[in-house]
Amino acid sequence: MFSKYKKPSSKVIETDGAAPALKAVPDDAADKVSMRKPMPRRAAEVTGVDKEKRRKERLQEIKLELHKSLLDNLNLAALETASEADLRAEINAIASESLQEMGVVLNREERTTLSQDLFFEVTGLGPLETLLQDDTVNDILVNGPQQVFVERAGKLMLSDVTFKDEKHLLRIIDKIVSAVGRRVDESNPYVDARLQDGSRFNAMVPPVAVDGSLVSIRKFKKDKLGIDDLVKFGAFTEEMAAYLQAAVATRLNVIVSGGTGSGKTTTLNALSSFIDNSERILTIEDTAELQLQQIHVGRMESRPPNVEGKGEVSPRDCLKNALRMRPDRIIVGETRGEEVIDMLQAMNTGHDGSMTTIHANNPRDGIARLENMIAMAGIEMPLKAVRSQISSAVNLIVQASRLQDGSRRMTSITEITGMEGEVISMQEVFRYQRVGLTPDNKIIGHFTATGVRSAYSDRFKLWGYDLPPAIFEPMVAE
Ligand SMILES: Nc1ncnc2c1ncn2[C@@H]1O[C@H](COP(=O)(O)OP(=O)(O)OP(=O)(O)O)[C@@H](O)[C@H]1O
Ligand SMILES: [Mg+2]
């Protein structure tokens, strides 16, 4: 019945008649099985933990063997069109026959786990699949086949997921990148891709990756954290949210600055919710992550060159083109190269209310980053002119940080107020004040206004955002 998914192969031993012809074990499998040591039966001597560990190891061994025979015998081309139920049935049938041949008896729970794992191996991303489906996991970081770290609630921890060997890991990487028409090998050792579910994927393979392939996955969240969630999680306060709402709605140009994984994209996405539904928004990203709620959104994804080095569409290309597409606002996922020129120009010339993120550890560094990017783009302009460009383009820098206890907070909201001589002047309006550490290394601190009056108060008022003065009063220490 399911033989359409099976490769026509001499290794498949047909059984009679209508019953599924499912002997999918390679010819030499029987030899392999007989060579294996029998399971130790000294139950009384082994502790429960040992037993459990061995059982797991044994299950892993069996799974790998079955997986190999599945891959050898399933017709992968036919899998594309197979329904999930058919495929699961096929896999179960092959598995149970192989198990029988190997003389292995599994309990019901083991059988269920096994067939689930095999299903993931065949259709999905193998060992990574359980982590991808685990909603508590934010990031998956693979350091070679034997070490897979995950980030949960801001904390990195080693998972119990492993790959059989480097070849197994490479096969999964290859599956991911070939699905998006890319290639990764010795001559082309690193690659960016997007998984089917939208997750961001990067891999680097040996020999550049010294101890086995390195993979990083930023999981795509179907429901991005909104302003309310972020306030609830303590990323910033309601007062700060009210200020940010006024800033975005009155079309200030905002840069979200932050380190890797500090929550820049999440913040940008949340801020975008303050944009009016009637505006035409264009987004430009390397990997489309933003999920804007507005109805009038045009999304663009830049593209690296293909294997022959052709076909690149850089963020700058997208940005230049976006300017011809009559946007009200432009949102660039991350500014990291020469597109900075066009971004600043857009911010200066009628596309106010635009937003982007940059990689920097504090607002002052953020400005320095912008200056560097301009210099690297080969623009020969006196520093003062560069700075005045920046200061008239950017109104607000919002700093996202991942603190050492794993919590993510908006550690500063800083306004750019102009130039003083050669220097860009800035004023911090809100900040996160750290005051100490609990015995279990949780950071103690609070958000506070700094007491300065916002340089945009009048603008906010004119646009109908009359923020109560109390918002800007600093918190008094108790
Ligand atoms: N305040 C928060 N509380 C809890 N989780 C958060 C918070 N902000 C972001 N996250 C989660 O942290 C992860 C990283 O966030 P995000 O992708 O926004 O970071 P990033 O700074 O854009 O990272 P990168 O530098 O890799 O682009 C995401 O899974 C996101 O859901
Ligand atoms: Mg990001």
Image (cartoon, rainbow, N blue to C red):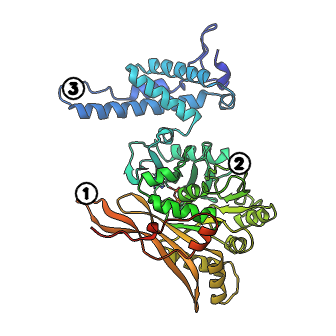
- Residue on which the image places disc 3: 42
Task: Give 213 or 176, whichever is nearer the viewer.
Answer: 176
Q: Locate residue 428 relative to residue 307 in the image: left or right.
A: left
Q: Under tag 2, what secondary structure?
A: loop
Determine which quarter of the picture holds residue 54: top left
Mark 2 or 3, closer to the camera: 2
**Residue drawn at (51%, 30%) of the image:** 118
- Who comes first in sequence, dot 2 or dot 1? 2
Q: Locate residue 445 relative to residue 118 in the image: left or right.
A: left
Q: Under tag 3, what secondary structure?
A: loop
Q: Give residue 295's mark.
A: 2
Residue 10 position within the rendered picture, expressed as x and y whole percent measured from the top left:
64, 23
Determine which quarter of the picture holds residue 441: bottom left
Q: Is residue 205 visible?
A: no
**Residue drawn at (54%, 48%) of the image:** 224
User: Real-space Cα distance between discs 2 and 3?
Assistant: 66 Å
| Residue type, label 2 | Ile
| Residue type, label 1 | Asp
User: Real-space Cα distance between discs 3 and 1?
Assistant: 43 Å
**Residue drawn at (51%, 71%) of the image:** 360
- Who comes first in sequence, dot 2 or dot 3? 3
- Residue on which the image places disc 1: 440
